[in-house]
Image (cartoon, rainbow, N blue to C red):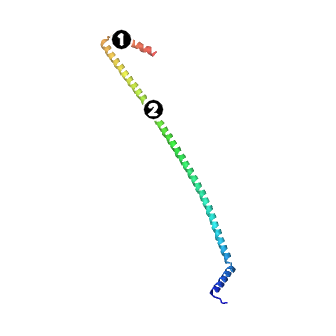
Amino acid sequence: MEFDATFFAFVGLVIFVVAIVYLKVPAMMTKSLDGRAESIRTELAEAKRLREEAQHLLADYQRKRREAEQEAKGIISAAEREAASIKEEARQKTEDYIARRTALSEQKIRQAESEALEAVRGAAVDLAVEAARSVLEKKSTDAVQAKLFAKSVEEVKARLN
């Protein structure tokens, strides 16, 4: 029996396989692969947990954003209502002010007309009295003047009593 190179290659292979089994290389490889698989499972679970947490945070921030938008709309509408109210109040106050000023001006005009009318009447009375006095001085005698004076004094006494 002659041993050729194939036989020695086979024997080397068998010795190599026995050495690998003896040194528990397959168990180490299995353990290493199992550890790697477990770390990948752990990383996947962590990634899934982080993804769910991120989705919850996203939903929470979207809800807060919607609430903030609603609050902003409420604030804007309240400000618009307040501005309209202030505008209406200012318009009403302006109208009232104009009405009061108009009434005051009309009252002053009526008072000025009344004072002017009284001044004209007073001037007319003074003029009439002066004209009457002038006419009486020119056309009346001393006896008529004494009689008119006595009558005037009696009228003044009657009005004072």
Across and down, in percent, residue 110 comes to: 41, 26
Task: Report which quarter residue 155 is drawn in.
Answer: top left
Residue at 64 percent across and 68 percent down: it is 39
Q: Residue furthest right?
A: 22
Q: Residue furthest bottom?
A: 2
Q: Residue furthest front?
A: 1
Across and down, in percent, residue 144 comes to: 34, 10
The secondary element bearing badge 1 is classed as helix
Across and down, in percent, residue 154 comes to: 41, 12
Q: Which mark is residue 146?
A: 1
**Label 2 packing within 10 angstroms: few (<14), some (14-19), many (20+):** few
Disc 2 to disc 1, C-alpha distance: 60 Å
Amino acid under disc 2:
Ala
Residue at 47 percent across and 37 percent down: it is 91
Task: Report which quarter residue 35 is drawn in.
Answer: bottom right
- Residue 34 relative to residue 69: left or right: right
Q: Nearer the viewer, residue 88 or 141?
A: 88
Total numbered badges shown on the rendered structure:
2
**Label 1 packing within 10 angstroms: few (<14), some (14-19), many (20+):** few
Relative height, residue 152 to residue 21 (above, below): above
The secondary element bearing badge 2 is classed as helix
Relative height, residue 150 to residue 22 (above, below): above
Q: Which mark is residue 99?
A: 2
Q: Nearer the viewer, residue 31 or 141?
A: 31
Q: Nearer the viewer, residue 71 or 22?
A: 22
Residue at 38 percent across and 23 percent down: it is 117
Image quarter where the N terminus lies is bottom right
Relative height, residue 58 to residue 40 (above, below): above
- Circle 2 or circle 1, nearest the eye: 2
Task: Report which quarter residue 16 is drawn in.
Answer: bottom right
Amino acid under disc 1:
Ala
